[in-house]
Image (spheres, coloured by chain):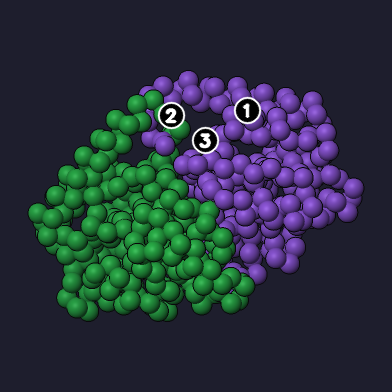
Chain colours: A purple, B green
């Protein structure tokens, strides 16, 4: 459901209020939360798992909320990896919003985690409009999405300060130049940080954590 | 802009009316149009180009409308390949709709094409709700999106009767089983047709045309 512009201003104002409430709740409970966005198959789930492994080694307790239109595949992967996790299905909606996340936080054992990754629904358009109240945002892109994909989605990249360019091990195989993605991102967001990652091997996970301030 | 449910029923009714108008216009002008959907980087553009090559060899005149949030990369690729093409930017919207497509059709040289591919914005959630008035729909998925991606998007697969599973040459390399994608699709849509394709090499393009009745 979308594209109905009646009263849009009020709706977005309400979303900002709800995001602020989430932010305050997370601060109060000492949880550092991150909104992980990216297209379908960009590798969000596996990258979160790789970061969680590193954090666990340091004694940091990690939780995850899996956002998807339908199904619980990602949630099951978080659980199988031993993370405290929640599943959040949006039905027809193409993004998480602060209201849905707020309800998920109410039911989450926040006292048992230090870091919470919130994996958004897989697309690069809609999540850009809906702040969740997290401390930081991360966009994961895969080189398999083509080297023009940053330019096609200027909004989300202009407003997101950490980007992972994932599956870099496939880049030469499929003839995509990660440098072009990085250059396009730097033009849109000169202050942003971009990290080349390969979630399968774990490459770049430590640098990504550092970029997120973790 | 989305997620504002006031009056949604009326809006969707209006979309259906506009889609019917597009359908009638295309019928009148003898143009067979197809709504090509799929995630970012699934290979929609290259697959359209491969099908267009085949059709051209048969003397069929092909046109394309490139739908994207921003930019004209896909449009430029269509033009470079010698297709009659139009570019359609949606701004903040995550999908094409019948209204926008109707305006694009008004300006399109319909008398000079027999087949028109309308490439939707790259995501698998929103386009499912917006019929464009085409004769047929095609969803392109890439094996790089992971073997759980059909189950994550039941709606669009249940309602789309032709699916291309693209980039199959990468499947074994990245450890994804295309058979699982096919099986999930068959469960959701027992009457649908699924074709394994590799747009880079052109594999499957003829079978895909046959599945679309072309």
Q: Real-space Cα distance between discs 3 and 2?
A: 13 Å
Q: At 64% across and 65% down in the image, what residue appears?
A: A168
Residue B21: x percent and y percent? Answer: 17, 44
Q: Which residue is mark 1?
A: A19
Mark 2 Cα-neighbour bin, 10 Å: few <14, some 14–19, many ≥20: some
Helix or strand or loop: what does disc 1 sit on?
Answer: helix
Q: Is residue A167 left or right of residue B47?
A: right
Q: Report x, y in % for residue B41.
A: 48, 61
Mark 1 chain: A
Q: Are discs 3 and 2 located on one and the same chain?
A: no
Q: Is residue A107 above or below residue B76?
A: above
When asked about the image quadrant of residue B148, the answer is bottom right
Determine which residue is flagged by label 2: B4
Q: Is residue B116 left or right of residue B179?
A: left
Q: What SS does tag 2 mark? A: loop
Kindly identify the residue that appears in the image at 40 percent across and 79 percent down.
Answer: B203
User: For residue B173, which quarter of the picture?
Assistant: bottom right
Labels 1 and 3 share a subunit:
yes
Q: Which residue is mark 3?
A: A129
In this orientation, which residue lies closer to the viewer: B112 or A100?
A100
> Which chain contains the residue that carries disc 3?
A
Q: Is there a contact, CB below 8 Å, between mark 1 and mark 2?
A: no
Q: Chain of mark 2?
A: B
Residue B63 in the image: state x and y as whole percent.
Answer: 23, 62
């Amino acid at each position: 459901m979308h594209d109905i512009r009646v009263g849009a201003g009020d709706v977005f104002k309400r979303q900002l209020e709800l995001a602020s409430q989430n932010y305050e709740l997370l601060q109060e409970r000492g949880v550092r939360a991150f909104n992980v966005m990216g297209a379908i198959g960009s590798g969000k789930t596996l990258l979160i798992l790789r970061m969680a492994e590193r954090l666990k080694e340091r004694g940091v307790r990690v939780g995850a909320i899996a956002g998807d239109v339908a199904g619980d595949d990602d949630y099951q992967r978080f659980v199988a990896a031993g993370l405290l996790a929640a599943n959040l299905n949006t039905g027809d909606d193409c993004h998480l919003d602060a209201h849905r996340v707020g309800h998920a936080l109410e039911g989450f054992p926040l006292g048992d985690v230090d870091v919470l990754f919130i994996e958004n629904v897989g697309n690069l358009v809609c999540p850009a409009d809906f702040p969740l109240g997290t401390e930081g945002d991360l966009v994961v892109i895969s080189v398999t999405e083509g080297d023009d994909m940053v330019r096609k989605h200027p909004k989300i990249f202009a407003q997101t300060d950490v980007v992972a360019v994932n599956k870099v091990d496939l880049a030469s195989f499929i003839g995509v130049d990660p440098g072009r993605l990085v250059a396009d991102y730097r033009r849109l967001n000169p202050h942003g940080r971009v990290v080349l990652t390969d979630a399968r091997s774990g490459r770049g996970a430590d640098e990504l954590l550092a970029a997120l301030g973790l």
